[in-house]
Amino acid sequence: MEHLLDVQNLCVAFRGDDHRERTVVDHVSFQVNPGEILCIVGESGCGKSVTSLAIMNLLSRNGHITEGTVLFDGQDLTKLSAKELDKIRGSKMTMIFQDALTSLNPVFTVGKQVMESLRIHLGMAKDESVKRAVELLEKVGLPDPETMMRKYPHQLSGGQRQRVMIAIALSCNPKLLIADEPTTALDVTIQSQIMALTKNLIHELNMSMILITHDLGLVAEMADRVMVMYAGQIVETADVYTLFRSPAHPYTRALLGAVPSIYDEPDRQLVSIRGTVPENYEFLTGCRFADRCDSVCDNCREAAAGKTMYSAGENHSVRCILFSADNTRPNTSGHCTSCKEEVTSHD
Amino acid sequence: MTEQLIVENLVKYYPVKGGIIPHTVAQIKAVDGVSFTIEGGTTLGLVGESGCGKSTIGRQIVALEKPTSGSIIFDGEDITNLSSDQLQKKRTRLQMVFQDPYSSLNPRKKVFHILADPMIHHHICTKEDAPAKVDELLDMVGLHRSAKDRFPHEFSGGQRQRIGIARALALNPSLIVLDEPVSALDVSIQAQILNLLKDLKTKLGLTYLFIGHGLGAVRYISDRIAVMYMGKIVEMADADTLFSHPLHPYTKALRDAAPVPDPTLRDAVHEALSGEVGSVMDIPVGCRFQNRCPYARPECGSVEMALIEAEPGHFVACPYTAINTQGVSGTSTMSGTQFMADTQSVSGSDKSDTSNSDRQEKGGAAHV
């Protein structure tokens, strides 16, 4: 199958106040197939948002793509001029952000903002765009769309604003929607409304979606495929069922063990990951998770560790030397034979 | 076990000023007749969506604000009427940990002073003993002792929250109000802090009021959970029963809306909740959840829902739960009319100016 989006070896660097370059996204490669929902999950600072901004070429002035290609629909987005990009962004590929209030322009009515992209990208006449905008607002479940057209963003609730954002994003029938933490600022009952709406629309319009989130619950609910990021790198990719059933990377395993759920057994003990996410992670040699990992051994700190993704099954790859071909250690919940006594055998 | 905290009929209204000559034009009914108790050494979780009044309750309990009416009895004494001197003494026993570990620590003070100053002020220790006490506190919350010579900005979010917890512990409190202490933290750090709080509770015999919106976290740390909606408690039960066997339609909706980290459960059919939380300035007569409730019936618009004990230790502010769960009306033995006797009818005209005494009567039925 032809990929809709094919990101190869994407590296993004930011220049700090000291004029030093910091690589925050390090050789990220992934594909999005037509009709697929890909979730990028990770903790704050892992590079998941920067990855999505780099795809859209929306990086702030001190950040730039240092390496890699972003093939969207056969075109390399990194090589396009600003003008050419404008034709793609907002029409074929759109994005919604966490905070809908700052993404909407406070001095224009909702109607005007929905109509804007219709008129620019589709060249619609005014009457036609009004009609279409009302349809769109109705489609995203806003009550009384005609009145809604005349309202300003501040008159809407958080959930309504996010619905307007979705209406704008879908206005030109895009092929890919990138949603960066779209419901983090919303209450849980509103979140479930918005996510159900998004999922239905994605399937109805046969679009693809990249959902960026830190909430593993949301991932379980939405994703077809999941990509786990840690310290600027992809550490594991798998389809959603495999990832939750048999997580391979020690980080993914720990992350899943750290999430409390209302369906837990009463005496469940949460697993906490020791330490914190490393800063200045580009200077770490070997596996970037080594300092916090329970299955760590000396090999993990060698330069070769953490450089390659290994296969952990069909369409399941993981950045952990436990899964390399010449590894002799058990790779599920085991400890290293050379460092720790306790070893659980691998099935 | 003795009740350490008894909250009765707590009401907090915030006035909304307006007009050419500024006067009170409306009231925000943030907390509207809430009663609950917390036994010593246990944790009560308070959940609800933003604006439901859960944080307001926390602020009243640590006496940062004076309630409009109602009483808060802590260790046998009503703290709502204390003079500021008396309150000063009480405050050492009542501490709070805030959501935002970035803004709740003074950026110009070193950790040593953040922890030592309150202890010296309240005569918990002398200036000479302070360094030893601070070391002890840092050990307790899992920070390195060298942390005391650093400023808050030098720490990560999780470490700052540990400092916040150490500050709360410095005065040997017996009750700590935890206002969304893990909401601003990453998943892996959340688990660390939740486990730390759990350990400290057992070790020091603390009582917690844990305010949060992450249901998983609240469920993990709480013994009992109260669910709030628009300024009122709608359901309260043991942490295990509340989510396995919810009675109120709102609790059910909240449970079903919370994403569960298990993709095999995602295709389960949930009744999606329609609509949004209404404005607390314009509270509907009768049940506050009626506009969004899938089981709403005409009576819901006229009857003020009081908290009733549907099962031992399980309180719910909906008289029709037995019918709702069975999905059949009329056949249930725990009929709606039986519960209706406990609730009081409110006429439409009372809507905006229900007097305080009225409220207290109504809240009285909601004693827990």
Image (cartoon, coloured by chain):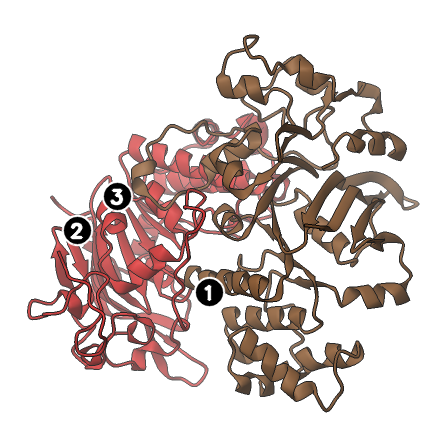
| Label 3 to label 1: alpha-carbon separation | 30 Å
Q: Is residue A163 left or right of residue A92?
A: right
User: Which mark's residue is nearer the viewer, 3 or 1?
Assistant: 1
Residue carrying label 3 = A224
Say which quadrant the C terminus of chain B sits in. Answer: top right
Residue carrying label 1 = B192
Q: Which chain is red?
A: A
Q: Is residue A71 left or right of residue B284?
A: left
Say which quarter of the image contains residue B92: bottom right
Q: Residues within 10 Å of mark 2 (few under 14, many from 20)?
A: few
Look at the numbered disc 2 and give the secondary structure of its residue.
loop
Q: Amino acid at mark 1?
A: Gln
Q: Whole-percent x and y of residue A165?
A: 47, 42
Q: Can residue A229 be seen at all in this image of the molecule?
A: yes
Look at 76% across and 81% down and name the residue there.
B120
Whether callout 1 and callout 2 share a subunit is answered: no
Label 1: chain letter = B
User: Which mark's residue is nearer the viewer, 3 or 2?
Assistant: 3
Q: Whole-percent x and y of residue B25?
A: 85, 39
Q: Which chain is brown?
A: B
Q: Residues within 10 Å of mark 3 (few under 14, many from 20)?
A: some
Label 2: chain letter = A
Look at the numbered disc 1 and give the secondary structure of its residue.
helix
Q: Relative to A199, is A291 above or below? A: below
Look at 59% across and 67% down and name the residue there.
B101
User: Which mark's residue is nearer the viewer, 1 or 2?
Assistant: 1
Residue carrying label 2 = A74
Whether callout 3 and callout 1 share a subunit is answered: no
